Image (cartoon, rainbow, N blue to C red):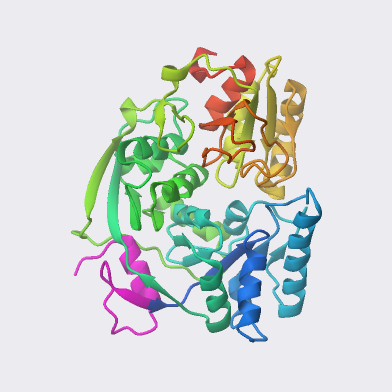
Amino acid sequence: MAKTIAEKILEAHVIDDRQRVEPGEIVRARVDLCLLNDINGPGAFRHFENMKIDRVASPDKLALVVDHFAPAPNAAGARLGVSMRKFAEEKGIRHFWDLGKGGIEHTLIPEEGLIGPGDIIVGGDSHTTTAGAFGAFGTGMSWAGIAAILALDETWFRVPASMRFYIYGEKPRFVTGKDVILKIMQDISASGALYKSMEFGGPGIGQLNMDERMAICNMALEAGAKTGIVEPDAATEVWAKEYCKRPYTVVSADPGADYESRHDVDFSVMRPMVAKPYSPDNVVAVEEIKGVHVDQVYMGNCANGTLTDLRQIASVLKGRTIAHGTRAIIVPATQKVYLQAMAEGLIEQFITAGAAVTTPTCGACFGGHNGALDDGEVAVATINRNFKGRAGHAGAQAYLSNSYVAAAAAVAGEIIDPAKL
C-alpha cells in the first residue's frame, strides 16, 4: 500500500512490525528525541516521580531547554528553572541548555543537530511540529505522555490521515514561508487539519530555505494538525549532511499515496498576509488593513527569530528609524543566531534604528514578560498565536505577520505593505 510521509516515518518506528500503520490505527513506537522546556518540563517531572521510577530509560533521547521564563521574571519562574537544573543533574541529562547557553528550543535543537529527516520528535510544547521543516515527524504531547516515554522509551500514536499541500509558482518579493501557512490557515481554518498530517511539497518549496520552512511547520499546529512535514529535497539533504549528529533517513511519500485531501498554493498570486485578532486563521492580505496604528512590534520567536528573519528585518530598517510612538523588540532565537547577527552588523543596525534587542527568550510570545502588552495596546508580531490575552492583557490586540511586514510597521508606526517603503 502506498503511504504518506507521516505513515512511512511511523512505520519505521513501530515496536511490532505486525502493526498496521494506516489512518485511525493505534501503534506503539519509539521516538528519537523528547523535548521539554521550563514550562512543561517540571509538570512532566512530577508525573515521572509519581511513577516511582528512579532513572530515565534513555537519557540521551531527552533534551531540556530553559527558554520561556528566561531570564526568570519572578520567583515562580525561577522555581521552574531550578526544577530543570535539578532534574538534569540527578538524571544525568547531558542535553541541557540553560539561560545564556542555548536559546529557544525549536530553533536550538536542529541547530545542535539533534534531529534529522525521518525522525520522530515529541515535546511538551505544541509547536514541536516545527521539526517537520527538516523532514521529521514532530508533535506535542501531554505531560503524562512525556513522563511515560521517560520511563518506558516508547509511546503510542493514532496514525493520522494526511493532507497534501502542493506549492508552485514564482515567489513574489516580501512573501515568505510565514505567508504560505497564513494563506493556508485562511483557506482551511483553525480546525481544518484537526489531527491530520499536513504535508507540504511541490516545486515552490525549493524557493524557501530551512528557516522559512520552520515557519510553515511551526504553525501547522494552529490548524489543529498532529504534525506538519515538508517533503525533503536537495536543500534538506544539504542541511542534514552539515548538521545531523547521528544517522538519518530521508523519507518521501510513495507515488500514489492516499491523501485525505489535496490543496494547491500558487506563490505567484500571493501577497504578504496578516492574521487579525483574535485567531491565526483571521487572515487578510496586508493592504486590506493598512493604516492600523501599532504601539509595539515584536520580531522573533521559535520559527521567526532565525538569521533569515533578522536579515529580512535589517533590509527594511536599513537607513530608517523606529517610528515615534512605536516600540520595537527584536529577539534572536538562539545565542548562535545572535552571534552571527552581530558579526554581520545586524544588531548594531537594530539598536541604531531604535529597537530593543533582547536575549533569546519566549517571554513576549506567550505574554509572560519582555514585551507583554497592556489593555488597548496594538502590536504586530511574528509569533504564532494571537488569541485574546496571549500577548498580555486580554484587551490588547496582536496582528501576526512575516518579518518584512513587522519591520515595515515598526518604521511606519502602522500596518503597511513593505513594498510601499
Location of residue 392 in the rendering, given as x and y in whole percent from the top left corner: 64, 38
Residue 3, relative to residue 147: is it above or below? above
Q: Is residue 7 magenta?
A: yes
- Quarter containing the N terminus: bottom left
Please state the horizontal and vertical placement of residue 90, each as a whole percent of the image: 75, 78
At which x and y percent is residue 172? 40, 26
Q: Which residue is at a point 32% across and 63% down the rendered structure image?
A: 160
Q: Residue at x 32, y 68 (%)?
A: 159
The magenta region covers: 1-27
Q: Residue 65's quadrant in the figure?
A: bottom right
As drawn, 106 above or below 169? below
Along the horizontal axis of the image, is 140 left or right of 28? right
The single residue placed furthest to the right in the displayed view is 75
Relative to 340, say whether 268 is above or below. above
Point out the image quarter for the C terminus.
Answer: top right
Of residues 241 and 154, the one nearer the viewer is 154
The residue located at (46%, 61%) in the rendering is: 139
At 73% from the left edge and 61% from the top edge, which residue is drawn?
80
Give the quarter of the image for residue 319: top right
Task: Residue 164: say if magenta.
Answer: no
User: Considering only vertical position in the picture, is 382 above or below 151?
Assistant: above
